[in-house]
Amino acid sequence: MRRYLGILLLALVAGVACNSKGSSPSQPDPRLAGAYVKPPQNNWVVVHLQGTPTQIGFQNGYLLAPRILDFEKVVRLEEEHGSHRPWSFFRNAAQKVMWPYLEPEYQQELQGIADGVQAKGIQLDVWDIVAMNANEEWSYFLEQWDKEHPQGQSAKLDFPDMGDHCSAFVATGSYTKDGKIVMSHNNWSPYMEGARWNIIYDITPQHGERFVMDGLPGVIHSADDFGVNASGIMITETTIDNFHGYNFNAVPEFERARKAMQYSTSIDQYAQIMEDGNNGGYANDWLVADRKTNEVASLELGLKNVTLQRTRNGFFVSSNFPINPKLIKEETDFKVNDKASSANARHTRWLQLMAENKGKIDVAMAQKFESDHYDVILKKINPDNRTLCGHEETVAPWHDSGAVEGKAIDSTMAGDLSFMAVFGHPCGTGFNAAAYLKAHPEADWQQPLLEDLPGSTWTKITVQ
């Protein structure tokens, strides 16, 4: 009887351990110490990771293993379809071109992710993980690769137009309701990716600042680059439209973006990290703010041309609209006079909203901006590819892409690493995958992995 009671007591203790910290598993492996997954917050999955680079990576891989395998399938399908190359090409490029330029800290974290998924019985290795992390810069890589290796070009690249890829702003001083910083962003992506873009990483690294960012399963960076760190640095961006250029002998964007989020304590330090070793991959207009100084900045980071603007009383808007005329001429095919283009039309709308709402902008208003459906060309409400809340599936040429989530933050929220977020279209409407595939049989190649995006509402994300 005593033996039976002892076994029962051990079972009860084990049950308590398994159910502590939300959905965290029991942690026999010391690399999982302190890591956990919180119960979903309105479709968002909040993951806390902490420790050494190896520990953080292992925790990411172990806790999100099924989601990482699912995302790997998405990236593989997109890249193979868009480039007409096998997945082995991307694995080899990850190993031979990108890996040598990654710092040991991030090599260890990437290897840790692979170790974590393998510990759950999933056979992905570190080259799969690196190739997934480079997802946003592969189109830049491939375009330059084909220029330098014309004999190796197997087919014309067939990626969707990735230039129209987010709507964002940051404002401070006389433009905001309390004179402090307000920032917001929505992420335009293919819906196949977007349905997986619901991870919130809360990371306490061994070195650097604690930080919170949205992201995809198995990444070391945000990928759409929205986040805030404990030093009060607030970050977002949108892609530079029709950008061309890539340096194979430099640091991948995904490492620089992660390092800047982890280590920056000022706008100058942020800009320096992003510029050091810049490879031109995933070229963006970065919006950055420092809640300590109430200053906001725009860092337009091309490969050849870099423009840093900053203010303590004003705003910066971003909708894939390039700023520097020299960058536009030397590094893009952007058509400045095409007022009906998505980037130009959304830029015009941002300027209207800033002027109309000067002195009134707060987080609630930022959420409305990111949900905005006013088309400045048609001069009416019409959700499409020219509205801040993008719906590219509604107009020809058809794309199953658009705004897949949104975030908004102010200085006060940044102080406790919280922000408002919505998964799916910021406006709250859903996307029906089956209906889209039925209407567009040319998209059948996505059928195995294209999923619905739910209609959702904004919710406060908290990690404290």
Image: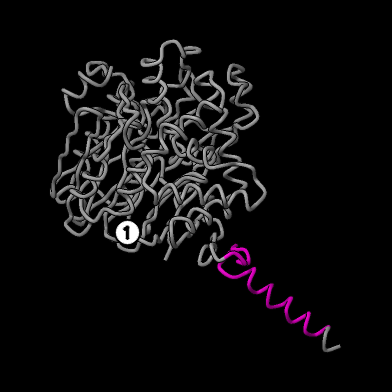
Q: Find residue 381 and report its horizontal and vertical position in percent.
A: 38, 29
> In screen coordinates, is 366 left or right of 13?
left
Residue 68, quarter of picture: top right
Which of the two residues, 337 or 371, is positioned nearer the viewer here?
A: 337
Task: Name the quadrant of the C terminus.
Answer: bottom left
Tell me the residue that label 1 is attached to.
208
Residue 277 on image: x %, y %: 27, 38
435 up-or-down from 179: above or below: above
Q: Nearer the viewer, residue 361 or 11?
A: 11
Q: Which residue does the image show at 25% across and 46% down from the upper left?
A: 288
Is residue 348 something one can see in this rendering? no
- What x and y, as percent, mark residue 50? 45, 62
Disc 1 residue type? Gly
Say whether residue 7 is magenta: yes
Q: Residues within 10 Å of mark 1 (few under 14, many from 20)?
A: some
Q: Which residues are magenta?
A: 4-29
378 lies left or right of 64: left
Residue 184 in view of the camera: yes
Which is nearer the eye, 129 or 68?
129
At mark 1, the secondary structure is: loop
Q: How many numbered marks, from 0 up?
A: 1
Q: Is residue 331 left or right of residue 3?
A: left
Across and down, in percent, residue 252 comes to 36, 36
Along the viewing direction, whichever of 454 and 451 lies nearer the viewer: 451
The residue at 36%/39% (across/down) is 101
Residue under the point 55% across and 68% down: 21
